[in-house]
Image (cartoon, coloured by chain):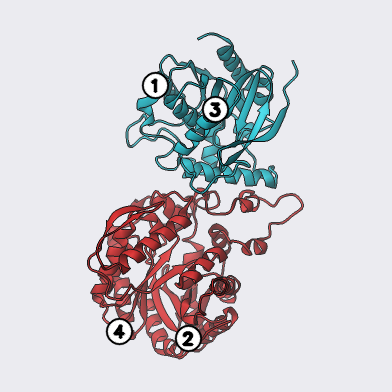
Amino acid sequence: METWWQCEIPYPFVPKDVLDAADSVRASLPNSWCDPRIAADLYEEVLDEFLLCDDEGLNVLAIEHHAGINSLMGANPMFVGILARQTRKVRILTLGTLVSLRPDPVRIAEEYATADVMSRGRLEIGFVKSGGTEMASNHTNPVGNLERYWEAIDLIRKALATHDGPFSWEGKYFTHRHVNIWPRPWQQPHPRLWSATGDPYTAAEVGRRGMVHVLVLRGPDGTKRAYEAHRRARAEAGLPKVTTDNFAYAAFVYAGETDAEGRAGGEKLLWFLNTSLKSAPQHSTFLPGTIPPELAPQAFRSGPPPGAAPDMTNAEKGVVPASQNARRLMSLGVDEAMAQGILFCGTPDNVYRQIMEFYDKVGGFGHLAMIGRSGFMSHAESVKGIKLFSREVAPRLREVKPIVPG
Amino acid sequence: MADATVSTDRHVVGDISLEILRCGVGQPILALHGMQPIDPAGRFLSLLGRCTEIIAPSHPGFGDSPRPADFDTVYDLAHLYLELLDSLPHNKVTLLGFSFGGWLAAEMAAACCHRIDKLILVDPFGIKLSDRETPDILDVFNTHPDTVRAHGWHDPDRFAPDFNAMTDTALVRYARGRDALCLYGFQPYMYNPQLKRWLSRIAVPTLVLWGASDRIVTPEYGRCYAGLIPGARFAVIDAAGHHPEMEQPETFIDHVTAFIGGGE
């Protein structure tokens, strides 16, 4: 199993009363609350932590979120470019440019190809569907997002893999009649592609396309179900079986010298859930296109309908709306987060054990995307966590070789 | 006079089978709904049906009208309804458009008036009037639902939809309509930059009605809109928001019947 370290570079330094009064801590909170001098310090600290990962042999992962306290990494390709130049050994995963928000996927392909060449072939390219606040921040129609997502990926893949001169693209969402990026990517025909999704429908498409499939904070049941949908779709399409190398899981991870220190680190990571997920109803429950209309009765009502309680478990058989998943996550404490497989923390031995228990529950995965710093965790604490994990846990995970699950 | 009864059937236009409300006997009116399909229990429908024949389709993607995968623009909707006009047995009909449906009606009338007898627009969307930093139309998708509710109705507690009281079926229809509205109207938001220029082509008697308390799109926008249509009359209905036909059905019907019953 490979480990990918990430920090979303949150900006937690907004007074609590301001956050409590705001209907959303993303998209609409005025940027006067973001002091650029503090932001500069955060960028410097986290980029240094990425470079420490390079020294310690932990792969690095750059995410993208926009316009909120949860992340200052809106300009994802800039981070990918910096990591391509400043790291020397480890692999770099972008997870990823929110492709359905960008008007021209060809420019994304150009940015990725450039980073792949700069890093001499160490780039992996992940795609994320984007959330409601990001739709608002980027002025994107939330209806049709998934179709646009796949068309953008198709165009990026073709732009990366076409090396014999211009081609034309006149799709439903994107038109670009002269595609011919320079440089072409270092890795041929293109860097490995990843996709983050939790719902079974998208999971099936990720499986058919043979992409690495990432589940983010979904817990064992949802993760297992998505991996199974991925494998089932491949089998139904007559495609060869894949190994655990095609599956990834993203969770909060902090290793400390003692269980108490590990748990203290883990608790700091949960700031991301408890504080930074708050978004306004127009960007979550009531955002068009985000849930099938059939789920509206349980989503739109403020209370249960007479005589029946909403059944979230049943809903998960189809799609767990991101907004519902967020509501569930916002109230989690350390023990609950650990029990749900969202947080792995404690001593290195215990962290390893928790990860492998989760591995067994979901049928195996080949990549751990670890959120190692969040909220008010200090640079020193993050550095300590990276060193301990990379020296005491990562080597043991590396011994977990790819297998064909299921 | 007894209220007219409302029935539901289907009308096929090309490859699309539209859900249609029908009500009343008399002068034919094609009614194009706004952000949600017309409520069959709505008072104004049965009142208007006393003297007119109302034909009220649900737009593809709304209600129980399917939407083909490649049908996703106001261009598609305007052409669908021009074709529907050609498929009706009536030589001419009055075209009545509410809100988003008012935009569709304006597009149709600007394109081709030969099957349209008269045009009635009720708090219509469709054009851009203010400067680039001043939206004319409240963004119902990027505004807190409580604000949308407050801006849309003169008396929201009495008239705004109550999700807790709606049936599952009604909520599914509501959500379906919201998705479709967002698909058609998201970009540019609820207007066609070209339409303003061509409103001068509308060559039929036109009445523009507006709820005085409408803060989704204001009466001042309506006054300017009417001014761009040759000879159009403009009237404001008091104690009504974006849906005067629902908040003040009697006054609304008085305006409509006077207009369609009178001369030019």
Q: Is residue A275 above or below residue A339?
A: above
Spatial CA span between label 4 and label 1: 71 Å
* Residue B49 place in picture, x, y as percent: 67, 21
In front here: B202 or A30?
Answer: B202
**Quarter of the rendering occupied by the N terminus of chain A:** bottom left
Dot 2 surroundings within 10 Å: few (below 14), some, or many (20 or more)? Answer: some
Name which residue type carries label 3.
Leu
Give the labeled residue for mark 3.
B85
Spatial CA span between label 4 and label 2: 25 Å
Along the polypeptide, which appears first: circle 3 or circle 1? Answer: 3
Q: Is residue A247 left or right of residue A190?
A: right
- The mark closer to the camera, 4 or 1, is 1
Spatial CA span between label 2 and label 1: 69 Å
Along the polypeptide, which appears first: circle 4 or circle 2? Answer: 4
Q: Which chain is red?
A: A
Q: Which chain is cyan?
A: B
Residue for point 43% across, 52% down = A135
- The mark closer to the camera, 4 or 3, is 3
Q: Is residue A85 left or right of residue A402?
A: left
- Residue B201's disc is 1
**Quarter of the rendering occupied by the C terminus of chain A:** bottom right
Residue for point 26% across, 81% down = A88
Give the labeled residue for mark 2.
A402
Give the labeled residue for mark 4.
A55
Q: Secondary structure at mark 3?
A: helix
